[in-house]
Image (spheres, rainbow, N blue to C red):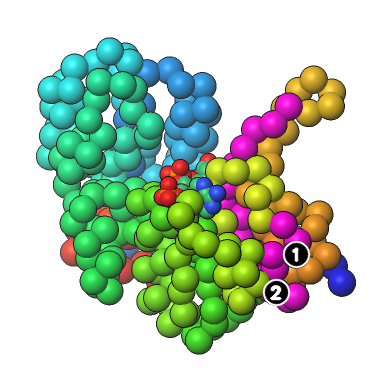
């Protein structure tokens, strides 16, 4: 048996195109240009690549993109002042502070200072609480992408057994809430879970968000399961360069699962596309327009 490869690149491109259509519509009908402000502190090379990518894709969708780069030794008060300015700026509908922040800055305080209506990363306690309460909320982008990828295989997740491995605020926990909203039955596993392979083998839907290269083996999977691999680890490659691998042993999974996301080309592609969706949603909500149809 060979599993279907879930093409995150294609699905993300389709989503970005739909966002661009909706942006064109709100511009035409309401004179609204959704705006996203991204704040980068320091010069972490991976973060710089992410921010550049977000900037390019935001502009390509027809939105306004505002980039703010601050030095790694910026005072917390100065970063808070920038967030306050963006909170008050009517041209900005979404604010994203790129994580991780350099040492010396308190991530929780910074996130809590973002206006929840503009919190397009979905990490503000207001949005996390609403999501946990089953209320409409801006939800974190990577878990949103995981749900879209799963729904490219299964139109309904109702009653399916899902396991989420990893319980971070960024991925695992919000993903559990989104799966509950889809009426899946969810197990959440973490570093203290016992019998992880056994728990996995029960699941129709496996989400791995750990950060441990190829931890989930083929014999952990129920035949036909759908596997969404969030993990990204950079390993040395034979040619002296590096390669990206996920949390799932891809070749093994392909022999057992029904559908698998590759790394790269799976979940990673969806994260920025969902950031654009969240920015459009935030802009419509702030301006009192109906929610976009996506
Ligand atoms: P994180 O904050 O480090 O959380 C990792 C989670 O994995 C924790 O809940 C931890 O459990 C759990 N864990 C660690 N070892 C485990 C083990 N042996 N068995 C079971 N669970 C274990 O990481 P994160 O931010 O959620 O990110 C997870 C991965 O996703 C990383 O590789 C990251 O690079 C990737 N990621 C990708 C995207 C994307 O766009 N594709 C976005 C975000 C993250 P405890 O809670 O018990 O410590």
40 and 112: which one is in front?
112
Which residue is the site of mark 2? 222
- What x and y, as percent, mark residue 20? 48, 54
Magenta residues (range): 217-236
In the displayed structure, does residue 22 sit left or right of residue 91?
A: right
Is 21 on the left or on the right of 112, as rendered?
Answer: right
Pick the residue in front: 54 or 143.
143
290 vs 270, left or right, is left
Which of the 4 image quarters holds residue 213?
top right
Contact (Cβ within 8 Å) of mark 2 with mark 1? no
Of the 4 image quadrants, the one containing the N terminus is bottom right
At 73% from the left and 52% from the top, the residue drawn is 249
Q: Is residue 182 magenta?
A: no
The residue shown at (31%, 21%) is 103
On screen, residue 31 versus residue 8, left or right, reads: left
Q: Mark 1 points at which residue?
A: 219
């Amino acid at each position: 048996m060979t599993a279907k490869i879930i093409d995150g690149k294609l699905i993300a491109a389709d989503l970005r195109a739909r966002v661009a259509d909706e942006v064109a519509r709100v511009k035409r009908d309401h004179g609204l240009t959704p705006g996203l402000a991204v704040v980068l502190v320091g010069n972490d090379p991976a973060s710089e690549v992410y921010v550049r990518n977000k900037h390019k894709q935001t502009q390509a969708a027809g939105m306004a993109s505002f980039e703010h780069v601050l030095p790694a030794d910026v005072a917390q008060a100065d970063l808070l002042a920038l967030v306050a300015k963006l909170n008050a700026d009517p041209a900005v509908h979404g604010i994203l502070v790129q994580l991780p922040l350099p040492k010396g800055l308190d991530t929780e305080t910074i996130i809590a200072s973002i206006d929840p209506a503009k919190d397009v990363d979905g990490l503000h306690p207001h949005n996390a609480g609403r999501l946990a309460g089953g209320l409409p909320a801006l939800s974190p982008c990577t878990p949103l992408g995981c749900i879209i990828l799963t729904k490219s295989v299964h139109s309904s997740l109702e009653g399916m057994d899902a396991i989420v491995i990893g319980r971070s605020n960024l991925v695992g926990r919000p993903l559990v809430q989104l799966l509950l909203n889809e009426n899946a039955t969810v197990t959440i596993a973490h570093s203290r879970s016992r019998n992880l392979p056994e728990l996995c083998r029960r699941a129709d839907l496996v989400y791995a968000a750990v950060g441990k290269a190829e931890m989930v083996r083929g014999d952990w999977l129920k035949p036909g399961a759908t596997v969404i691999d969030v993990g990204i680890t950079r390993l040395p490659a034979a040619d002296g360069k590096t390669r990206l691998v996920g949390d799932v042993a891809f070749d093994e999974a392909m022999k057992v699962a029904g559908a698998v996301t590759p790394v790269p080309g799976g979940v990673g592609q969806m994260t920025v596309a969902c950031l654009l969706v969240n920015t459009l949603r935030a802009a419509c909500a702030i301006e009192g327009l109906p929610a976009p149809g996506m």
